[in-house]
């Protein structure tokens, strides 16, 4: 095994810190007595920064290198993890969540190219797949640690014990990566300005299929973040479950999503990716029906698991198809689609307002709109693919 992969895999674990925002916002809502719309500004704020930082990060990598860019993202993440250890002031939490979003936007843009550098082009695809699995471990551990902390008042911090634990892992990842020598080829001399890169990326929206893919990524990420934010609230609203127990449903979602991603690579060996995308979306439709009408714990758990499994593969399928559609502009396509992660900003805000007005069924209906778009995307995309 390439020893340089150890710090890189820990960086993937740190990438998974962003998925704690769902359960964290639920505890902050309870601690500060916030409305759903106010509490949902926290996860929304995290994903806003993907809109702003994804393309400029590619320019930054040309100037300071991939490893240094990853280290910069980890430094921001460490500060974000440290703030809630000392205070739950809402303004400081906004700062913490913003830094987490900025750091994660930079990390997601720079870590994948760093893997290619470390692997020197060999087995990079399988390494990235394993990295996503490591990321999912951080995602599904967060609700477990938060619930344990709240139940035992761990470290005298309650649910906030999640932050120093992840802070320590982040420090280890940073130190190991800093001490690892990674040879990077010099960046090409011809570089585009940030403005030119933005213009080049947005020009691709004139391609009907790329526009469909961009909107599909927005919906995919919005459903992902929305489920982790809303699922515990559904349990509390309909079954009277306490938050410490309801938090476990987020773990069910992320475990199911990890299983979906892991099994998807095998399923697509026998089933075309576009057919598997339809199957995934239909599972999400079934999950939405269960979350709208289900009022018992088993139905809600099963629906959340279906949502996780179904939402485990659309990103990779959409991303790969978009790259194939415009192979001469892969960098621009990549930057544009990563910008689509800001769907994690739009959906929670809309879901917060809907749940304040209608209860949690309103939030699920907002997610259902995103799922129906993915179904329409499959239908329209199938036609477009026939012309590619």
Image (cartoon, rainbow, N blue to C red):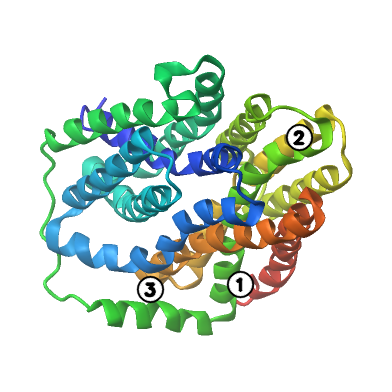
Numbered tag placed on residue 235 in the rendering: 2
- Residue name at image x 44 percent, y 69 percent: 336
Indicate left or right for 140 with 75 as reference: right
User: Distance between the Cα atoms at labels 1 and 2?
Assistant: 34 Å
Of 302 and 248, nearer the camera is: 248
**Contact flag, marks 1 and 2 (Cβ < 8 Å):** no
User: Which mark is first along the chain, 3 or 2?
Assistant: 2
Indicate left or right for 4 with 285 as reference: left
Inspect this view and state whether residue 260 appears. Answer: yes
User: Distance between the Cα atoms at labels 2 and 3?
Assistant: 45 Å
- Residue name at image x 70 percent, y 73 percent: 383
Q: Quadrant of residue 41?
A: bottom right
| Residue that carries the numbered disc 3 in the rendered image | 329
Name the mark nearer the viewer: 1 or 2: 2
Which quarter shows the N terminus? top left
Residue 216 vertical position relative to residue 262 in the rendered view, above or below: below
User: Which mark is first along the chain, 1 or 3?
Assistant: 1
Numbered tag placed on residue 212 in the rendering: 1
């Amino acid at each position: 095994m390439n020893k340089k992969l150890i710090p890189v895999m820990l960086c993937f674990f740190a990438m998974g810190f962003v998925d704690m925002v769902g359960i964290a916002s639920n505890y902050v809502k309870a601690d500060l007595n916030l409305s759903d719309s106010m509490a949902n500004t926290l996860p929304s704020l995290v994903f806003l920064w993907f809109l702003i930082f994804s393309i400029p990060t590619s320019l930054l990598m040309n100037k300071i290198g991939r490893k240094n860019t990853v280290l910069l993202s980890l430094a921001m993440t460490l500060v974000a993890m440290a703030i809630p250890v000392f205070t739950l002031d809402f303004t400081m939490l906004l700062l913490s969540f913003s830094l987490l979003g900025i750091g994660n936007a930079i990390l997601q843009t720079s870590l994948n190219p760093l893997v290619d550098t470390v692997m020197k082009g060999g087995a990079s695809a399988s390494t990235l797949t394993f990295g996503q699995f490591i990321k999912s471990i951080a995602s599904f551990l967060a609700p477990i640690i938060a619930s344990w902390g709240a139940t035992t008042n761990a470290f005298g911090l309650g649910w906030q014990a999640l932050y120093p634990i992840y802070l320590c892992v982040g420090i280890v990842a940073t130190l190991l990566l800093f001490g690892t020598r990674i040879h990077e080829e010099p960046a090409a001399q011809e570089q585009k300005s940030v403005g030119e890169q933005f213009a080049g990326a947005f020009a691709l929206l004139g391609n009907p299929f790329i526009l469909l893919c961009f909107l599909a990524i927005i919906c995919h990420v919005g459903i992902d973040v929305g489920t982790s934010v809303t699922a515990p609230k559904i349990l509390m609203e309909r079954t009277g479950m306490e938050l410490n127990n309801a938090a476990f449903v987020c773990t069910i979602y992320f475990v199911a999503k990890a299983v979906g991603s892991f099994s998807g690579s095998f399923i697509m060996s026998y089933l075309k990716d576009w057919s598997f995308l339809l199957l995934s979306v239909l599972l999400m439709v079934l999950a939405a029906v269960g979350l709208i009408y289900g009022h018992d714990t088993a139905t809600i758990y099963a629906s959340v698991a279906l949502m996780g499994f179904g939402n485990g593969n659309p990103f990779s399928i959409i991303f790969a198809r978009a790259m194939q559609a415009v192979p001469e502009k892969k960098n621009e396509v990549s930057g544009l689609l990563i910008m689509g992660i800001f769907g994690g900003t739009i959906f929670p805000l809309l879901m917060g307002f809907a749940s304040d007005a209608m209860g949690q069924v309103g939030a699920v209906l907002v997610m259902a709109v995103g799922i129906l778009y993915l179904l329409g995307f499959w239908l329209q995309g199938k036609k477009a693919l026939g012309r590619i």
